[in-house]
Image (cartoon, rainbow, N blue to C red):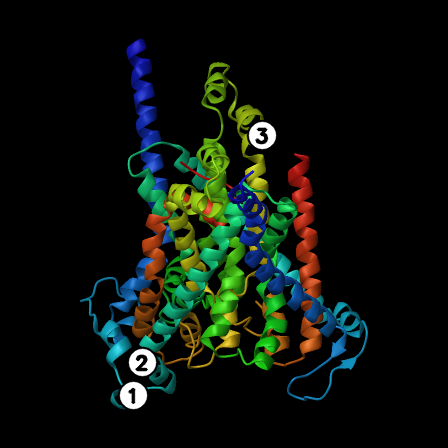
């Protein structure tokens, strides 16, 4: 064996490790370090404005938060937002996917146009919906007035509708992409034989379409539910959680506690409760998806 | 009889086609309208933007786009303070966004591509665990890590610096770069690379002479999504920057709640701000589903 071959094989052995090292190190630094720090902080009473050393109070932050009616109201509020937004997005996405499953001229262009909202910056979405919903010169308010015959102040009268509407506008195309991918994965011969067997629409859906698209639908719901739970930018820029606390979802509440009231320990505790919910939800979904 | 059936079938087809086009038009209007209206508003004067009922026909003006960059503090002293800040030096915020976006993407892409290649080809021990760990950061709510990072940055002197923001965005986009690029590497047959390795070629050379050229399209798509990710990021920019390093989204969000704001001017800034996304949606169309799922779902033909 020549010495060159030995160097080569040694390089081959450590080469893969060298390649992943920077990435794994950075991600670990990003996730593990701050999370541990935040977890520690959640057991302390600490206020940046008041200053002074953090005081260890054990689980009191958690105890107080979980016994606060206010916090539970935000849980319900966030849950409502996620439920409304994701289910409407699913229905619209489902309809759109079936529409675009047809082949017709201009289909590609139509798909591109419909999916445009997906990449638009959330902040821009929030701010221009503020204009669209504006009570005096917003065009959505104007349309609402044309329909109902009286002035409608959407943002102050129906704030939940406004944030759900905005989310549906931006994310329905996401559901559509998933379901369309599912539909296109159905083997052509199965569709054809279901035509020949004259299966009813319902039977065709139940036995041919649904089994193929089910895993993708589960994934789409997983992604959307998680993201809807974390929604911050769009709601923050549209309503800032208001009027009052009518649209103050959990992430905005955490932001306010941490960076407006500077009750850092309490915010960290709430953030951890939030994280646990997300992890639980992810697991439930993944288990459901895997069982299928 | 046969004729009649054909006729009926023909009519049904016409009805179906009409329905398809009708629904498509409604869908396109619903999803495009807000963006159209934003661009339209950017071409309106202040008075036109405030008109009730909203103006559908008007003479477009590019005044707002000029004002974003040229209007100086002294010229608009009469107008509200918020607008004053907006109208003076929007170019600074765009410059900041550019610097942060491109620096962090350059680093994340290099590190990410290397790791993705290794995970795809060599599958070192623990690959699946590490990949899952990397993916799990996708589910992490930003606000949870925002609290500790804010205080780290304050105490380490990274607050309000380019370096701080670039470092943060690099870390946040690494998982995406790794997963996305791995999905592209996985698609390329590895026979040639293996043959070259067996022949005793240098693995470094095999990587950039054989493997890399085969995933250039995927690399382009990955970079496209990274640009959007960083360009659109808001929460950390809001928490970690002040005027010197403030990026465009934070500046736009700063217009919240002002009563007398010039919507035409803001719409112009927003239009410029979302322009890269509007261009990229056309270029990335084929990879859209993939890009939004970390490369885990391959997507529509």
* In contact (CB < 8 Å): disc 3 and disc 2: no
Q: Nearer the viewer, residue B128 or A246?
A: B128
Q: Is residue B63 left or right of residue A286?
A: left
Indicate the quadrant where residue B256 lies.
bottom left
Looking at the image, residue B103 lies above or below residue A168: below
Looking at the image, residue A225 lies above or below residue A64: above
Earlier in the chain: of badge 2 and badge 1, it is 1
Q: Secondary structure at mark 3?
A: helix
Q: Residue at x 72, y 68 (%)?
A: A39
Q: Residue furthest top?
A: B1
Do discs 2 and 1 belong to a common subunit? Answer: yes
Count of residue discs:
3
Q: Can you identify the residue that label 3 sits on?
A: A211
Q: Secondary structure at mark 1?
A: helix
Indicate the quadrant where residue A205 lies.
top right
Numbered disc 3: what chain?
Answer: A
Q: Secondary structure at mark 2?
A: helix
3D distance between C-alphas at marks 2 and 1: 7 Å
Q: Position of residue B115 (x, y in %)?
A: 53, 51
Q: Nearer the viewer, residue A90 or B119?
A: B119
Q: Can you identify the residue that label 2 sits on?
A: B87
Q: Is residue B67 visible?
A: yes
On residue B73, the disc is 1
């Amino acid at each position: 064996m020549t010495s060159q071959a030995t160097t080569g094989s040694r390089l081959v052995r450590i080469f893969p490790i060298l390649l992943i090292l920077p990435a794994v190190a950075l991600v670990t630094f990003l996730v593990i370090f701050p999370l541990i720090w935040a977890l520690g902080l959640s057991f302390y009473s600490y206020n940046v404005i008041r200053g002074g050393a953090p005081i260890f109070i054990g689980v009191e932050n958690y105890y107080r938060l979980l016994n606060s009616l206010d916090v539970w109201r935000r849980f319900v509020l966030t849950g409502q937002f996620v439920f409304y937004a994701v289910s409407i997005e699913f229905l619209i996405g489902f309809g759109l996917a079936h529409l675009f499953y047809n082949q017709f001229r201009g289909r590609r262009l139509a798909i591109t146009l419909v999916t445009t909202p997906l990449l638009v910056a959330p902040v821009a979405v929030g701010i221009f919906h503020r204009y669209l919903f504006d009570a005096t010169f917003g065009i959505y308010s104007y349309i609402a007035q044309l329909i109902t015959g009286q002035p409608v102040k959407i943002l102050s009268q129906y704030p939940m509708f406004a944030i759900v509407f905005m989310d549906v506008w931006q994310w329905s195309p996401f559901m559509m992409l998933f379901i369309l991918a599912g539909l296109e994965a159905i083997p052509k011969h199965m569709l054809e034989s279901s035509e020949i067997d004259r299966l009813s629409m319902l039977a065709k859906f139940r036995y041919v379409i649904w089994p193929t698209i089910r895993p993708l639908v589960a994934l789409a719901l997983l992604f959307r539910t998680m993201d809807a739970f974390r929604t911050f930018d769009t709601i923050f820029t549209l309503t800032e959680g208001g009027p009052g606390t009518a649209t103050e979802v959990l992430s905005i509440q955490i932001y306010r506690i941490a960076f407006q009231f500077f009750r850092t320990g309490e915010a960290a505790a709430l953030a951890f409760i939030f994280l646990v919910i997300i992890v639980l939800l992810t697991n439930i979904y993944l288990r459901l998806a895997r069982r299928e | 009889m046969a004729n009649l059936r054909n006729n009926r079938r023909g009519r049904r087809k016409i009805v179906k086609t009409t329905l398809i086009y009708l629904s498509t038009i409604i869908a396109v209007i619903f999803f495009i309208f807000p963006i159209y209206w934003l661009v339209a508003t950017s071409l309106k004067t202040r008075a036109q933007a405030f008109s009730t009922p909203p103006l559908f026909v008007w003479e477009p003006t590019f005044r707002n786009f000029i004002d974003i960059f040229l209007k100086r503090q002294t010229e608009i002293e009469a107008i509200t303070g918020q607008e004053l800040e907006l109208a003076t030096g929007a170019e600074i915020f765009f410059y900041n966004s550019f610097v942060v976006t491109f620096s962090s993407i350059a680093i994340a892409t290099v590190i990410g591509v290397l790791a993705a290649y290794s995970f795809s080809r060599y599958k070192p021990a623990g690959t699946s665990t590490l990949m899952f760990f990397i993916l799990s950061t996708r589910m992490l709510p930003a606000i949870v890590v925002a609290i500790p990072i804010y205080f780290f940055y304050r105490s380490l002197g990274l607050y309000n610096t380019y370096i701080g923001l670039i470092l943060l965005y690099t870390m946040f986009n690494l998982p995406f770069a790794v997963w996305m690029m791995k999905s592209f590497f996985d698609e390329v047959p590895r026979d040639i690379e293996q043959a070259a390795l067996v022949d005793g070629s240098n693995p470094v050379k095999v990587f950039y002479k054989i493997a890399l050229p085969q995933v250039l399209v995927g690399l382009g798509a990955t970079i496209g999504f990274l640009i959007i990710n960083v360009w659109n990021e808001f929460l950390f920019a809001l928490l970690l920057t002040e005027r010197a390093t403030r990026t465009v989204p934070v500046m736009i969000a700063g217009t919240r709640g002002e009563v007398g704001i010039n919507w035409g001017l803001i719409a112009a800034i927003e239009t410029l701000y979302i322009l890269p996304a509007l261009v990229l949606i056309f270029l990335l169309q084929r990879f859209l589903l993939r890009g939004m799922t970390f490369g885990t779902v391959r997507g529509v033909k």
